[in-house]
Amino acid sequence: MGEIDSFAARFSFAPRYFSDGFKRKLAKDLFQAKMGYSPDYYLSLSFGIASICFVFSLVMLSASLEYLPISILAFVIAFFSMTSYPGMRKKKRAKRIEKELPNCLRLMGIHLNIGLSFEQSLKSACNNSGLGSELKHVVKNIDNGSSVQEAFNALSNRIDSVFVKRAVAQIIASYEKGGSGETLKKLADEQEAIIRARLKEYNGKMTIYSLLFIAISAVFPAIFQAYMMVGSSFLNIGITPSQALLMPILVFPIANITLFLFVRWKSP
C-alpha cells in the first residue's frame, strides 16, 4: 500500500478541481461500498490511473498528435470508470444483501413466534443467515452501549437499499411493540417475490444481450473488414492502416468488455 499511497500523493492536486457536492457523493459511495478510502485520496488515485491510460494510449498510437483526441478519450473513460466504480459496487453489495435479508427476516420472525426474546432472535439470525457479518456489527454496537434503534439505523445508513430501510423500520417496530414475527415473515415473502420477478426479467433480457455480444464479437468486425477490403480497392475511404488496425485490436475488444461488465452489473 505504501507504493500506491506514494503514487496517489503525486496527484494530490486533483481533488481541488472538483465540487464539494461531487466529493460528498463520492464519500457516501465509498462508505456504502465499504472501500475505506477518503474522497480526496480516491480522486487522486483515479486521476493518476487515468493519466497512465492517457500516456499509454498516446505511446501505443506512436505519440502522434493526430491521435490526441483518442488519448483524451482514454483518460476520460478511465477516470469516469474509476469514480463510478464505488457507486456500482455499493449497488451490487445492496443487491446481495437484499437477496440474503429475507431468510434473516423469516428466521427472526420464527424465533419471535416461538417466544424467544428479540436479542436471542437477533443473535440466532446472526449465526445462521448470510447476513452474519452485518448483524454481528449491529450486535457489537448494542453491546457497546448503542440502542437497538441506533444500531439498526447505522446498518440502514451503510447500505443503499430501500428494502433494507423498510426491513430496519419493521425490525425496530417489532422490538418496540414486542409483537409477533408475522410481519417480518410477510415482508420476507414480499421481497422474495420481487427477487423472483427481477430474475425473470433478467433472463428475458439475456437473449438480447447474447445477440448483441455476438454482433459485437463477430458480425460488426466482419462487416468492418469487408468494408475495408472493398473500400481500399474501389473507394477513397480516408482511413490509414494504423486506424484500420486500431478497430479490431482496441475498439471491438473494449466494446465487448464494456458489454460484459454491463451485463454482470445488471445481474440481480
Image: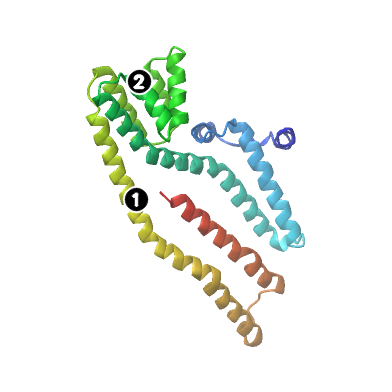
Measured as percent of width and height from the top left, residue 117 is found at 30, 18
Q: Earlier in the sequence, mark 1 or mark 2?
A: 2
Please name the residue shown 59% across and 30% down the image.
38
Q: Amino acid at mark 1?
A: Arg
Q: Nearer the viewer, residue 249 or 77?
A: 249
* Location of residue 144 in the rendering, given as x and y in whole percent from the top left corner: 47, 13
Q: Residue at x 30, y 51 (%)?
A: 197
Callout 1 touching callout 2 (CB < 8 Å): no
Q: Residues within 10 Å of mark 1 (few under 14, many from 20)?
A: some
Asked if residue 79 lies left or right of residue 22, the reply is right
Q: How is the image coloured?
A: rainbow
Residue 220's spot in the image, x, y percent? 54, 73
| Farthest-out residue, front | 114
Residue drawn at the location 42% of the way across and 14% of the way down:
146
Seen in the picture, residue 159 relative to 212 is either above or below; the reply is: above
Q: Which residue is mark 1?
A: 198
What's the amino acid at mark 2? Answer: Gln
User: Is 71 left, or right, of 18 in this rendering?
Assistant: right
Q: How many marks?
A: 2
Residue at the extreme bottom:
234
SS of the residue under disc 1: helix
Percent x, y for residue 124? 38, 26
Q: Secondary structure at mark 2?
A: helix
1 vs 2, front mark: 2
Q: Around disc 2, counting alpha carbons within 10 Å, would you say few (fewer than 14), some (14 to 19), or many (20 or more)?
A: some
Examine the image and state in which quarter residue 17 appears.
top right
Give the camera-side residue of 130 and 79: 130
- In this figure, which residue is indicated by the disc labeled 2? 120
